[in-house]
Amino acid sequence: MKHCRESSQWSRRCLELVLILSLVGSFSSTRALAWGGFSHSLPQLPSRMLGYSTQSGLQIKVDSSWVGNRGYWPVSFQVSSAAPSNADRQITVRFSAGRRRNSPHLITVEQDFELVQGDSSASITLLVPQLAEWNSCSWEVWIDGVLDEALSQQYVSFNRTNNNASIALVMPQRLGQIVVGSVFESHVAAGRLDIAAGNSELPEKWLDLSSVDVVSATVEELEEWKLDSPARFKELLRWIRAGGNLWTVAVGGPVDLSAVAAALGIPNSQQSEGDLAPGWHYLPLDGRTTSGVDSLLELKFGDSNEESGWRQQWSGNRNNPRLESDSRNYFAARAFGMGTVTAFLDTYSSMGSNKVFEAIDNSMLGQRTSWVNRHGNNPGRGNYEFNNFLIPDVGMAPVFEFQLLMSLFVIAIGPVNYWMLRRREQLPLLLITVPAAALATTLVLFAYGLLSEGINTRVRARSFTMLDQAAGEAASWARLSYYSSFAPADGFQMPSDTAIYPILPLSRSNHRALQSRELRWGDASVKLPQWLSQGWLAARTPTQYQTITSRPTSKHIDFRKTDEGLQATNNLGVDVLALAVQDTSGELYLAENLAAESSISLAASTKAEVMLMIRTLLSSQEPQFPAGAEVRTRRGYSRKTLSQNLMETELAALTSPAIKGWGNRSYVAITSAGIEVDLGIERVIEQDSCHVIRGSW
């Protein structure tokens, strides 16, 4: 046993030396290896380097090459044996990442998979939430419930180049070979881009792309993905619907905008701009000088909202006179769900990459290519808007009630107690009555605080859902504010198609605001496979999260023309508090209180009436700081605010004075609950929530 232990220690020392050499070599590499991207994150560990474990007879290869600084990071594990396995073997991998070698891990992710009898290899990809920047990582491998130390590693350095790159860009094979080595080389060297380029296989889940800012491909590649990998292609579309950015570019010729729309399954729109295909628009190149709402309306409607005068305003307030007034010489763009699709009108090299990025930076796309800008939140830093979305009257000390009880206690324990005992000539009993009364008062205060807040978990939710009924797809963003009297024993349970990011309060130290969290992925067939087991919800502590979901759905509202007008049938599964509809001819209709699984005839309405109703309902639930709260910021915290992220911009655009409508065959519904918003806990009380659906049929 001693000889085996010494041999194992020698093997691990050799492995650590190989890891160090691999890390050093990775710093000098600037070429992309595969769709997984540069190997500069954690070195790819070839199987031949590790050898076989004497305990299990298996060897392991770990690859964490990818791009991006936030979102879910894919880490792949592949185990193999020299000969086919003679029995099914259960394998458990437990991956942890943290800031420093000797500091607690910030995130630990665990998942099981099997090496099936007769197979010689099996693999799994763990999606690890990047809640903060990692500098070290470790992993454990368990074979049939027994830890295999030879396959496990502790405190491996996790280093990245371009760690602060402003755009994480993914390119497939054909386009990657053309542009990575020449056109974008200077941007990579300057830390502008973090590029992954390689084979044409798409990730299996949209969460695999959650750390990516941009996916760039040719029209031909989009069509190939749609035919050869329809399931993965749908996941790419779900990523775009959830706020991602797709760039399409030509190889040797101009982009056919209609072909791009057809490849993505986008129906033709009645709106067009000049010589562009319907739905596409040239963007002003002074997008940074205007509000996010106006930029969003420009993306969706272009010049159709003539009364706003955006183009005239921008043309007279230009920051960069070297650029044209709009993007017609570079690209056209359109909205797709909550994301964007951009078509570059020539190859990157023909337009010049410097000019391309200058045009992007000066358009609204410049803000959308930043992960933190899109989300309005940095999961690793405090957000000064944390306190504007607390649950009213929950988690706050009942100051007046406590003052009243303490005053009664002082009066009773002092003069009243002394007078009664002196009258009965029992003053020595003060030694008993004073501590007894203090104990009783303490218990009363504790019971009052417990009963006043209850023993349940409460949540305040604010969500926005883009519902494409024709495609049967929904993308939802939500901000969730929790307060739990007792931390749930089972933690959170979130579906596998939902991303969850903490919203941290301000603190004196960012490091103190972070805490260790654990996540266990279940089997893909399980309805709720994302088990957030530890560190996600503390007792009696205001806690907030941002969730993003993109998935197929059958929920919808049926609309039917009748002799009396327009009839709506609610198949959303929740009650509709208010419903505003723009029909096929652009006419507006309004209704209130439409219960689930019921129908109602909509009354014809005007823009003023519709906007007044929606604005009234939304304004009553807007995030607000508590009365008397000090609103301040600190250096080092996230400068981008939640009130400026994609969700809040979409909500603000619904009632913008500049908008004429939302487009034909569309509606806005304010509902009693979110239709595709998971709260993570079964027994939870929802309070002061606001749920909005922006639907089309």
Image: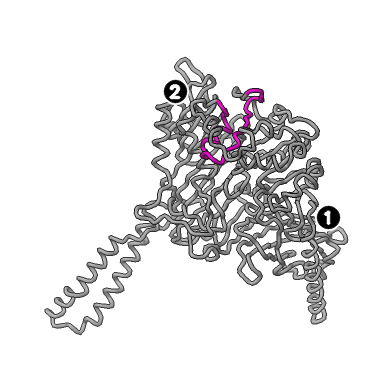
Q: Quadrant of residue 632?
A: bottom left
**What amino acid is at disc 1?**
Asp
**Image location (x, y in percent) of residue 65:** 74, 55
For the rendered model, the colour scheme is one colour
| Viewport quadrant of the N terminus | bottom right
**Image location (x, y in percent) of residue 160:** 71, 59
- Report the magenta residues as a range: 274-303
Q: Is residue 641 left or right of residue 1?
A: left
Residue behind mark 1: 119
- In the current view of this chain or complex, which residue is farthest to the top? 563
Q: Which residue is found at the position 70% from the left and 69% from the top?
A: 155
Which numbered tag is attached to residue 601? Answer: 2
Q: Residue 465 colored magenta? A: no
The answer to whether residue 263 is above or below residue 501 is above
Crowd rating for badge 2 (residues with CA inside 10 Å; few <14, some 14–19, many 20+): some
Q: Which residue is found at the position 65% from the left and 29% from the top?
A: 266
- The tag earlier along the polypeptide, 1 or 2, is 1
Distance of mark 1 from mark 2, alpha carbons?
Answer: 61 Å
- In the current view of this chain or complex, which residue is farthest to the front? 321
Q: Can residue 223 be seen here? A: no
